[in-house]
Amino acid sequence: MLNKLQTHHLIFIMLDGLKYSTAVQQMGYMHHLVEHGLAARFKVKSELPSLSRPLYEVLLTGTPVYRHGITTNHSVRLSHEQSLFHLTRQHGLTNATAAYHWVSELYNKAPFNPMTDRYQWNTDLPIQNGIFYWEDHYPDSHLFADAGHLLQTAKPDFLYVHTMNIDDEGHKHSGNSAAYRNRAIAADMLLAYALPYWTSLGYQIIVTADHGMNDDGMHNGTTDDERDVPLYVISNKVQPGVYEDVVSQLQIAPLACHLLNIRASNAMLPLTILQAEPVPSV
């Protein structure tokens, strides 16, 4: 798997609402890769507030909320920052996304119109190839199929894949429910189906989340259940294994730039995550 990975192709998978403890306990395929030296696992501390739209902007621009100004889920406007979509386009790379419509509202069009904006093909926009959905129960299986279609047709250097079903189940049933845990298992099964093929095409992989979920079926606060999320990396540029040091969420965007072999924006923090060492295996 790893010896086929190219240094400039990346698929960034964001599993909305997946807390770290649930990922560790339920995602058997991802931990199979970790155990066999094919993936790295980190614990990430999300920025605050632990809300979706503000953290989408954190993940894709590497900037904190006080700077980027997307402070609530109701902040419907285009980003003022340089996102991974802007940067890949500026460096001559192609990009694509299969994502929730708030991603379109941050980087391409705001507000989103379902009748005209579901499919977006425009190389002059930050997101050059986009398939967007707007209902939280839109099946993750269909979303992965959308991503596969983009890989086949657009062949992007950078693909962002954004699922919503884990978050949806958490809000309906809480972050300590069978429904929430089972949805994480279902996402792991989709990864088990997709990743062997995607890595065979030469793509490096990032899998992470924006925030977690508490026992009340909410997030916005400062608890570990709401802030601690997983980060898995499959790349020749990152040593596999389990890393115990907690990583800032502001490191993920510059890490993506490093994997894509492009210059990070001036607003991003210096990349320090690669200075850490995994714990020795027993």
Image (cartoon, rainbow, N blue to C red):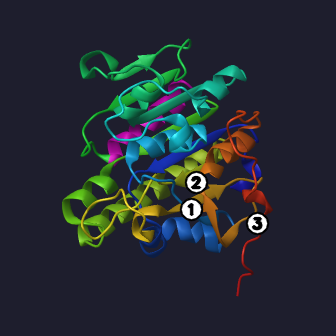
Q: Residue at x 76, y 63 (%)?
A: 239
Q: Indicate the amino acid at tag 2.
A: Gln
Q: Indicate the amino acid at tag 3.
A: Ala
Contact? badges 2 and 1 (CB < 8 Å): yes
Contact? badges 2 and 3 (CB < 8 Å): no
Q: Quadrant of the C terminus?
A: bottom right
Q: Residue at x 61, y 42 (%)?
A: 62
Q: Residue at x 29, y 73 (%)?
A: 176
Q: Which mark is residue 165?
A: none
Q: Indicate the amino acid at tag 1.
A: Val
- Of labels 2 and 3, earlier in sequence is 2
Residue at the left extreme, as displayed: 172
Q: Secondary structure at mark 2?
A: helix
Q: For the magenta stretch, what is the residue range?
A: 140-155
What residue does disc 3 label? 276
- Of labels 2 and 1, earlier in sequence is 1
Using the image, determine if residue 186 lies above or below residue 224. Answer: above
What residue does disc 1 label? 44
Instruction: Decide which of 12, 35 is in the foreground and name it.
Output: 12
Q: Secondary structure at mark 1?
A: strand
Instruction: Answer left or right for 275 relative to 119.
Output: right
What residue does disc 2 label? 249
Quick one: label 2, few (<14), some, or many (20+) residues within 10 Å?
many
Based on the picture, tell me whether residue 277 belongs to the magenta stretch.
no
Residue 148 percent location from the top left of the image? 47, 37
- Of labels 1 and 3, earlier in sequence is 1
- Gap in Å between the C-alphas at discs 2 and 3? 15 Å
Instruction: Decide which of 104, 193 is in the foreground and name it.
Output: 104
